[in-house]
Amino acid sequence: MLSYHPLPSADVSRSLSIAGKLRLRRYPPFLNIRAAQQIPNPPSTGLQRKTDQVLSRILITEAAIKAIEEKAESKKYNNLWPKAVLEALDEAIRDNRWNSALKIFGLLRQQKWYEPRSTLYAKLLMMLGKCRQPEEAKLLFKLMRADRLRPSLDVYTALISAYGQSGQLDKALATLDGMKSDSDCKPDVYTYSILISCCVKCRQFELIGMIMDEMSYYGIECTTVTYNIIVDGYGKTKMFKEMENVLTDMVESGSSIPDIFTCNSVIGAYGNSGKIDKMEKWYDEFQLMGIKPDIKTFNILIKSYGKKGLYEKMGSVLEYMKKRFFTPTIVTHNIIIDAFGKAGDIEKMDEYFKKMKHQGIKPNTITYCSLVSAYSKAGLLMKVDSVLRQVENSDVVLDTPFFNCIISAYGRGGDIEKMDQMFLAMKERKCEPDSITFATMIHFYNVQGMTEAAQELETEMIAAEDNLGIL
C-alpha cells in the first residue's frame, strides 16, 4: 500500500518487479470584464511592462505577417528582403497559421533567390498535420516534387503525421509503403512512433501490433517514447490489461526503461478510473524502479484522491510535498479547489482559494470556473456576482469556457436576465459561442417556458454552425 508518513523513498534498492428574446440592454458595470481578444488596461507593475513587451512583439509579428501576405497577392514582388519573408514564414508556421504560411510560402517561391529545401517542406507538412489539413499536405507534397526535390525521411514522416492526425490512417499507411520502396529513405523509429501515435489518437489499437511486428522485422527497436505512447493510449481508454502487458514488454526489453512519463501515465489511468488500490500499487512499483515523482505525479494523486473523497490522503500528499520542497502550482490549487467544490464543501473550497492568493498564486479562468460551478450548485448566486467583481479587477484573460460556466450558473439559478447579459458580454468581447453555449441557453429558456427565445437562439446556432463551423 502507498504510505505518506513518509512515502517510500526512491532510494530503496531498485527492483524491476511488475505488479424569451435576448434582452438587448447594457449590462451593469461589474460585468465589464476582459476577454481573450481584448487588451487589458495596464497597471503600473514590472510584470505588466513585461506583458506589454510580449504584446508589442505579437503585434509587430502580426503586422509583419500581414504585410508579407499582402505582397503575396501580387506577382510583382520577386526580389524581397530574404530575412523579412523567412521570418514571417517562420512565425506563421510556429503559430499554426496554415493559410498565412502557405500564402507566404507561395511568395517565397517567386523570389529570385529562392532555393527549394526539403527541411522547409517538412516544417510546413508538420504544421498542416497539427492543423488537420491533409489535402493541403497532399498538394504541398506534389509541389515539392515539382521543385525537383526527393522526399527526405523527415518529409515522409511529416506527411504520415498529416494524414494520421486527420484520421486518414489508410493514406498514412500507404505513404509508409511508398517510403519503404524508396531505397534512399527508409522509415526509422521516429516514423513508426508517429504512426503509432496516430493510431492511438484514432483508437485503432488493432494496428499497433502489426506496426510493432513490422518494426521487429526491420530490426527497429521501440524506444521509451514509443512504449510511452502506447501505454498512455491504452490507459486513457481503460484498456488496463493491454497497458500492463506493454509495460511488461517495455521492462523486459532491457533497452527501453520506464521513466516518469510512464509512471504518470499508469497511475493517472488508474486514478482517473477510481482504482485507488491499483494506483497506489503502481506508484510503489515505480518508486522501487528508482523513478522519483514530480509535481505532475503529486497532482495526479491529489486529483484521484479528491474524486473519491479521500481528503485525508490529499492532505498527506500535500504534507509530503512540503517536506520534499515541492511547491504547489496553480494546477495543484485548482485541483484541490475543484475537488472541494464538486463535493459541495464551500467552506473548504473558499479556504484553499484564500490560501492560494495569500501565497501569491494568481487565479486563472480554471480557478474561477470551479468557484462559479460550486457556488451555482449550492444556490449561492451572490457569490457568483462576487467572482465576477474579482475578475473585473484582475488581468485574467477570459475565454469561451468561462462564459459558458457563468451562463450556466445564472441559468440554473433562474436569473435569465443576467444569463442574457453574459451572452451579450461574451459576443461583444469577441469570444465566439460554441455548441455548449447554445445548448445551455436553449435548455434554460425551455425550462422557463420561453419557447420563442429558445427557437430564435436555435436559429442563431444553426447560422453559426454554417458560417463558423463551431459545432
Image: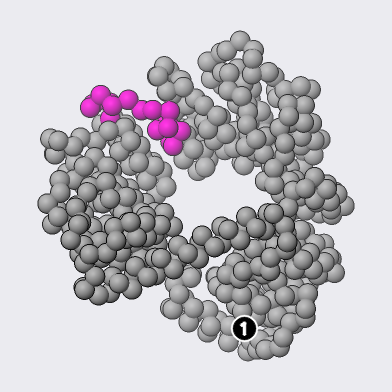
Residue at x-position 62% and y-position 83%: 454
Q: How crowded is mark 1: few (under 14 residues within 10 Å), some or many (20 or more)?
A: many
| Residue at the far right in the pictured view | 347
Is 180 positioned to the left or the right of 442 in the image? left
Q: Is residue 210 above or below residue 401?
A: above
Tell me the residue at 73%/26% (across/down).
324
Q: Residue 226: within the magenta?
A: yes
Front one among 324 and 76: 76
Where 250 sits versus 331, above or below?
A: above
**Could you tell me what secondary structure mostly forms the magenta stretch?**
helix
Q: In this view, does 52 lie to the left or right of 158?
A: right
Q: Nearer the viewer, residue 205 or 195?
A: 195
Residue 382, located in which quarter of the rendered image? bottom right
Q: Looking at the picture, tell me which residue is in the foreground, 193 or 94.
A: 94
Q: In which quarter of the image is the N terminus?
A: top right
Instruction: Find residue 79 and report its image quarter.
Output: bottom left
Q: Can residue 390 be seen in this view?
A: yes
Residue at x 74%, y 82% (from the top left corner)? 27
Q: In this view, does 359 lie above or below 143?
A: above
Q: In the figure, 298 relative to 417: above or below?
A: above
The image position of residue 468, as x and y in percent, is 45, 75
- Identify the residue position indicated by label 1 in the image: 454
468 is within the stretch colored magenta: no
The number of discs equals 1
What element does badge 1 sit on? helix
Extent of the magenta region? 215-230
Name which residue type carries label 1.
Answer: Ala
Q: Where does the image place residue 252, in percent across and percent down from the top left?
A: 43, 18
Note whether residue 367 is visible.
no
Report which quarter residue 220 is drawn in: top left
